[in-house]
Amino acid sequence: MEIPVFIINGFLESGKTAFIKDTLASEDFNDGDRTLVIACEEGEEEYDKDAMATLNASVVTVEDMSEFTKDFFINSCDKCKAQRVFVEFNGMWKLEEFIDLLPKFMEVVQIITLVNAETYDMYLSNMRQVMMEQYKLTEMVIFNRCTKDSDRAAYRRSVKAVNGRAQVYFESSDGSSNEVNEILPFDVTADEIEIADEDFGLWYMDAMDNPEKYDNKIIKTKAVVYKPKQYAKKGMFAPGRFAMTCCVEDIRFIGFKCVCDKNTEKQLEGYKDRDFIRLTARAKAEFCKEYRGTGVVLHAIDIENADKPEDELVYFN
C-alpha cells in the first residue's frame, strides 16, 4: 500500500508546526487515519504528545539528513501503522535529495512552502539562492504574518520567477487571507501595449498567468531572437529575453511562441539567435503544447532591427 507524503517546507519559525497541527485538526484530515509526523527541526512551537494522540498522530524527530534510511522510513511507518506522513522539512536541507531517499511505498502528493513575511526581505538579501531553491518543487507558497507594509506583489513575483506553476497565497498577521492585485507599469487596457526594456520580465509573468488579458492586443517590445529547430520549417520563432531569477548560475531564457506570415518570415531571415529585434505582434490566447495549456501566442506583424538595451538581462522585481 502506498503511503501519501505531504511535505511542509520553509525556514525556522515560518509557521510549519502550527500549520501541520491546524491541518490535522481540520475537517479534511481529522478523519481517524493514522498520521506520522517527521519533524526535521525544533522551533518555538512544539508538538504536544497528548494533543497529537487525540489527532491519531505520532511524531518522530530527525536532526540530520543521514538519518533518512530505508529502515528509518519502514520502521517509523510500521511503529505507528501510518496511513499518511507529514514532513516538517528543514528549509536549509536539499528537498530533491530527501525525495530521492523516499522508498517506493511513500509517494509525495503535495509540497507546500511557508514563508514568514516579517523576515522574508532579510532572507532574500542574505540567503537568496537557498530561498529560491525552496520554490522550485513546491506547488503552493503561503506568505503568513503579512502587514500593510508587506510588498505582496514583489513577493509573488519572486516565487513565480522560479516556479510559474506555484500557487501563491497571503495571510495577514491576524490569520485572515488576502489577495494581491499586481500594479503593472504598462496599460493593459490599451489596444496597443508598449513593453519597456526593463518591464519584459513583469509582462512575461503576467501574460503567462493571465493570457486572456492580452488576447487580441498589439504588443510592441524589444526581444532576442531564438529559432528552435522544431520551428525552423514552420515559419515560427521564440522571441524573448534572458532573465536572472536568483544568481548568475540561474540565468535562463524566457519567451513566447511567435508565428510569422510570409512578410515577417522574410524579415526574420536576416537575424540569427541572440540578435535583438523590435517586434510588433498581435497576441492571441491559444492552446499551445509548449505551454501545456492556453498561453499567449504572438503573431508577428513587423520585425525591425534594434540596439541592445542597457542591461541585456531582465529581472522580476
Image (cartoon, helix red, strand yellow):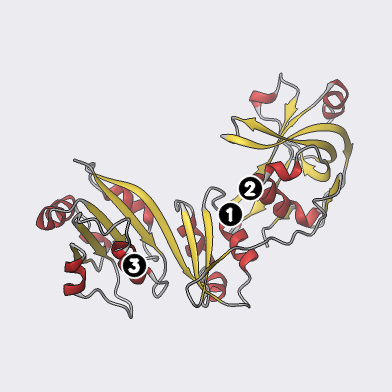
Residue 119: % across, % down: 51, 76
Residue at the limit of the structure toward the front, as seen here: 27
Residue 22 got which mark?
3
In 3D space, how far apart are the residues under numbered discs 2 and 1 (Cα atoms)? 9 Å
- Quick check: 174 left or right of 193? left
- Quick check: 254 left or right of 134? right
Q: Is the residue marked by circle 3 packed among few (<14), some (14-19), or many (20+) residues within 10 Å?
A: few
Q: Quadrant of residue 226?
A: top right
- Disc 1, SS: helix
Find disc 1 in the rendering and name its residue.
160
- Disc 3, SS: helix
Choose mark 3 or mark 1, whichever is in front: 3
Quadrant of the frame with the C terminus: bottom right
Choose mark 2 or mark 3, whichever is in front: 3
At 34% from the left and 67% from the top, the residue drawn is 22
Residue 264: % across, % down: 85, 27
Could you tell me if the residues under marks 2 and 1 are in contact, i.e. CB atoms within 8 Å? yes
Quadrant of the frame with the N terminus: top left
- Disc 2, SS: helix
Residue nearest the viewer, comparing 89 with 98 = 89
Q: Amino acid at mark 1?
A: Lys
In 3D space, how far apart are the residues under numbered discs 3 and 1 (Cα atoms)? 27 Å
User: Which callout, 3 or 1, points at the residue further toward the start of the chain?
Assistant: 3
Residue at the limit of the structure toward the bottom, as seen here: 44
Residue 17 got which mark?
none
Residue 209 got which mark?
2
